[in-house]
Image (cartoon, rainbow, N blue to C red):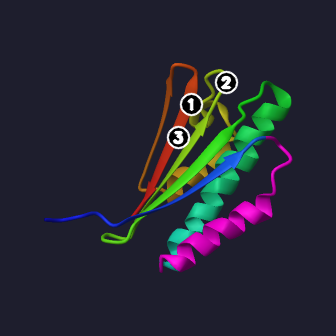
Amino acid sequence: MFIKRLKQLEVDIDSENFDFIAISSQLEEFGRNNMMPQKLIRNAQLVFEEIVSENLVQYSENVGTLYPIRVIAEYFDTDESLTMIINYCGEQYDPFLDGDELSMKLVKKLASESEYCYEDGNNRIKVCFR
């Protein structure tokens, strides 16, 4: 029987006053503890910065709150893939369409797959790296 060996990190952000450096460090520690390739660790940190800091926090400050924001990093060591899921509340806001264009181009370039969905008042972004 084949069992996927999944490692997971969850971080909740309740306001724009969150500690960016601490969360970035948590992503680094999560990656090192699970022997992730450095490229995946760095990509996770960059995607977190671009989606959360440059888009979701900026949107919340200017238009309407999206808090709480939950960031989930899932690492499958069997194929060295990483999935980041970012869930947030509020009105529909798709950073891929309505966010900072340069930030989201970087996310798309780093990711092997990315998607956004909105359902029942919940926004969800999924970004995969291989």
Q: Position of residue 110 (x, y in %)?
A: 52, 59
From the viewer's perspective, is the residue at label 3 or at label 2 nearer? Answer: 2
Side of 30 where 77 appears, left or right: left
**Magenta region, main secondary structure:** helix
Quadrant of the drawing holding the N terminus: bottom left
Q: Residue 33, relative to residue 48: is it above or below?
A: below
Residue 90 is marked as 2
Give the residue at mark 3.
125
Q: Residues within 10 Å of mark 2 (few under 14, many from 20)?
A: some
Q: Position of residue 75 (x, y in %)?
A: 44, 64
Q: Residue at x 62, y 74 (%)?
A: 29
Q: How many residues crowd around disc 3 within 10 Å: few (fewer than 14), some, or many (20 or more)?
A: some
Query: Where is residue 33 shown, x and y percent of the image?
Result: 54, 78
Q: Amino acid at mark 3?
A: Ile
Q: Amino acid at mark 2?
A: Gly
Measure the C-alpha gap from mark 1 to mark 3.
7 Å
* Residue contact at pointers 1 and 3, CB within 8 angstroms: yes
The label on residue 123 is 1
Quarter of the picture holding the C terminus: bottom left
